[in-house]
Amino acid sequence: MPELFDAIVIGGGQAGPFLAVKLAEAGMKTAMIERSHMGGTCVNNGCMPTKTMVASARVAHMARRAAEYGINVGGPVTVDMKVVKARKDKIVETAATGLVDWVGGTENIELIWGAARFAGPKVVEVNGRQLHAPRIFINTGGRPSVPDWPGIAQTPYLTSETILDLEEVPEHLIVVGGSYIGLEYAQMFRRFGARVTVIEHGERLVSREDEDVSAAIKEILEGEGIAVHLSARDIAVARHEGGVRLEANVGGVSMSAEGSHLLVAVGRTPNVEDLDLLAAGIVASERGYIRVDEQLRTNVEGIWAMGDVTGHPAFTHTSYNDFEIVAANLLDGEVRRMSDRIDAYALYIDPPLGRVGMSEAEVRKSGRRALVGKMPMTRVGRAKEKAETLGFMKIFVDADSQLFLGASFLCTEGDEIVHALIDAMSGRVPYTVIARTMHIHPTVSELIPTLLQELKPLE
């Protein structure tokens, strides 16, 4: 017999659980279906565990630098990966358990563990049950992609998820993928004590960023002893003496690297193969991402998709904002769209990169008259006091409207100070207002007004 619900939420990522509770609190009988773990990538094998381990790696790094600050740590710095992992696991378990308790304990929600699939536009099957609802929301997320390199099927490798289970520091970690995920792990494990080699297909690291940002990131990582190889082609891997051997054509020259561990960090794949989207008539892209409109609606009336499964920027904050957009339109009588939000994100190497709005290439392509300001962190008193002067701050402004276009903060606290511009851009505040604003000394943010007072035409 079909079971009737007012709403069904498939997937417990960073949008699904919050929407399920919101729907339930609005009086809707809601089924929350999750296949394996609540909280999605962020809680289980993304933001939360990785940033916990990044924090441990930074402590190790700063302990090795202690003498620069006049501090004696009393001997060589060592890393106990079992303790690092245990600390990470505890934080993840607390968050995931709290989420399960919250959702499962909410009135009007039935939390169902199992793999869901569509049996029609309004019908979902799970664990032999058939659930019907006029509103269905998909939040199944994504997983690491694995390329079909020669030898990959016979070679042990790690992904951004399985590497979190390591209880020992790799002797030599080979990272294939020089973008956000790969670089965070590269620096992290270098600071834990591993030799690290990064292999990147593109001509530069994090190729979506400005060239000066990419160059500075490369310099930062190489400064910590990480080997970086760009323009890699024809990658092949194989087992080698208890570890792995990678061969590639790098810039037209054959190279090989032998390591104890291989991390494959070359992209993400949407979790849609078990859903049977065709049964519901849902349209997806060639790569499997569910197509949605500005309000996260699929082509099928009554079905929405949120988060990484849509193919939009795969960040926790965008997934959560998807929930806010859907809930506002559906329950709060508001009209909200994805285009209302300003692109913003961070890369959590150290120093971090905080990004908002347009890149330099995008500003140039727009054809508008623009102003630019760039300041090296060697000019920032707070950075000098902390002995963290790597990187720079860069801001773009529309010369005619005086509105901010974008910014890159590759610097200490860059992931925090970028919010000053996110807020200014959201409020459409002219840069002249910030340029005349008194900031607190000594901080990194206090140099933003100074930087804005030194803007020059983008040539």
Image (spheres, grey):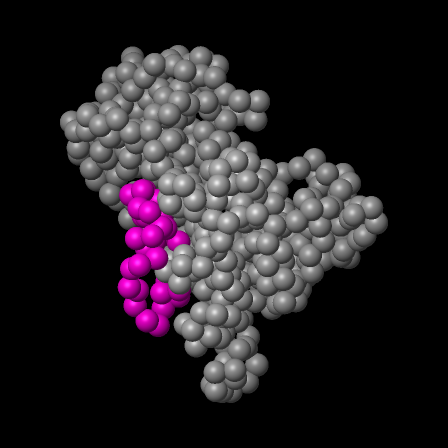
In the image, is residue 374 part of the stretch drawn in magenta? Answer: no
- Residue 65 location in percent, x, y? 53, 78
Q: Which residues are magenta?
A: 418-447
Horizontal arrangement in the rendering, residue 248 relative to residue 428 (left or right):
right
Horizontal arrangement in the rendering, residue 61 relative to residue 433 (left or right):
right
380 lies above or below 228: below
- Residue 365 location in percent, x, y? 55, 36
130 lies above or below 171: above
Horizontal arrangement in the rendering, residue 257 relative to residue 145 (left or right):
right
In this view of the protein, can residue 437 be seen by the observer? yes
In this view of the protein, can residue 53 be seen by the observer? no
**Foreground of the two, 39 or 202:** 202
- Residue 384 location in percent, x, y? 46, 75
131 lies above or below 58: above
Q: Residue at x 56, y 67 (%)?
A: 191
Q: Residue at x 49, y 66 (%)?
A: 377
**Foreground of the two, 218 or 310:** 218
Quarter of the figure with residue 64 = bottom right
**Foreground of the two, 136 or 349:** 349
- Residue 165 location in percent, x, y? 52, 54
Q: Quadrant of the N terminus?
A: top left
Q: How many marks?
A: 0
**Foreground of the two, 262 or 342:** 342
In the image, is residue 434 part of the stretch drawn in magenta? Answer: yes
Q: Residue at x 49, y 37 (%)?
A: 368
Horizontal arrangement in the rendering, residue 244 relative to residue 188 (left or right):
right
Q: Residue at x 24, y 30 (%)?
A: 328
